[in-house]
Image (spheres, rainbow, N blue to C red):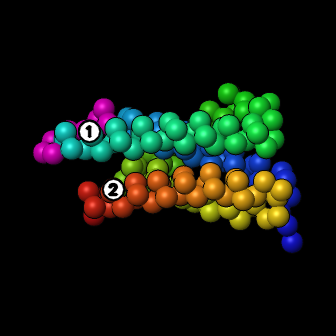
């Protein structure tokens, strides 16, 4: 049974919120790096937050192309990102949790594609985000586990 168009839109908006929350988390951790190896952490988090900027923009442009730019509401987008952010900062390792939250949102968006007319194109966008988020998980696991 194909997912409803609203289900895909909602999943893409949740992914957009997860990307924005991860960006904010990585950027904050970039500033908070301390102790032995702090400069390596500083650069790692910089790499991670900068990668999110392009993904946030590409996903927003995809949402606008498929559903209309009126779906990109600044206040509701930031409120959604704050809800994701609350779960991230409560985790023992917020950086790793931020990357994992992106992967969870990617999985939900992928499941919602169904037989959408633009499904292949949307899948390509979220697949790129998934690849990048998995790289972030790997880098953070190597650093902290």
Position above or below: 53 against 138: above
Q: Nearer the viewer, residue 4 or 131?
A: 131
* Main SS category, magenta section: loop
Seen in the picture, residue 87 relative to 3 is either above or below; the reply is: above
Residue drawn at x 63%, y 43% is 59
Q: Could you say which quadrant of the image residue 117 lies in? A: bottom right
Q: Image check: 97 left or right of 72? A: left
Q: Is residue 106 above or below residue 38?
A: below
Residue 112 visible in the picture? yes
| Residue topped by disc 2 | 140
Which residue appears at 62% of the width and 63% of the height?
Answer: 107
Distance in Å between CA atoms under marks 1 and 2: 12 Å
The local crowd at label 2, few if under 14, some if 14 to 19, many if 20 or more residues have their Cα within 10 Å, is many
Q: Is residue 133 above or below residue 76?
A: below
Question: Where residue 121 is drawn, which disc sits there?
Answer: none
- Left or right, 65 with respect to 101, comes to right
Name which residue lies at 69% across and 49% down.
Answer: 12
The image position of residue 108, as x and y in percent, is 67, 60
Would you say residue 36 sits in the magenta stretch?
A: yes
Location of mark 1 (residue) = 42
Instruction: Point out the stretch of residues depicted in magenta.
Output: 30-37
Element on which disc 1 rests: helix
């Amino acid at each position: 049974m194909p997912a409803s168009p609203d289900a895909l839109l909602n999943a893409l908006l949740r992914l957009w919120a997860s990307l924005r929350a991860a960006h904010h988390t990585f950027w904050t951790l970039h500033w908070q790096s301390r102790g032995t190896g702090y400069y390596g952490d500083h650069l790692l988090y910089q790499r991670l937050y900068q990668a999110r900027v392009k993904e946030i923009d590409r996903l927003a442009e995809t949402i606008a192309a498929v559903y209309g730019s009126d779906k990109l509401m600044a206040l509701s987008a930031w409120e959604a990102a704050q809800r994701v952010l609350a779960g991230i900062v409560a985790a023992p390792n917020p950086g790793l949790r931020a990357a994992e939250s992106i992967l969870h949102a990617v999985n939900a968006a992928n499941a919602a594609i169904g037989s959408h007319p633009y499904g292949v194109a949307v899948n390509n966008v979220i697949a790129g985000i998934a690849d990048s988020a998995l790289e972030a998980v790997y880098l953070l696991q190597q650093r902290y586990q």
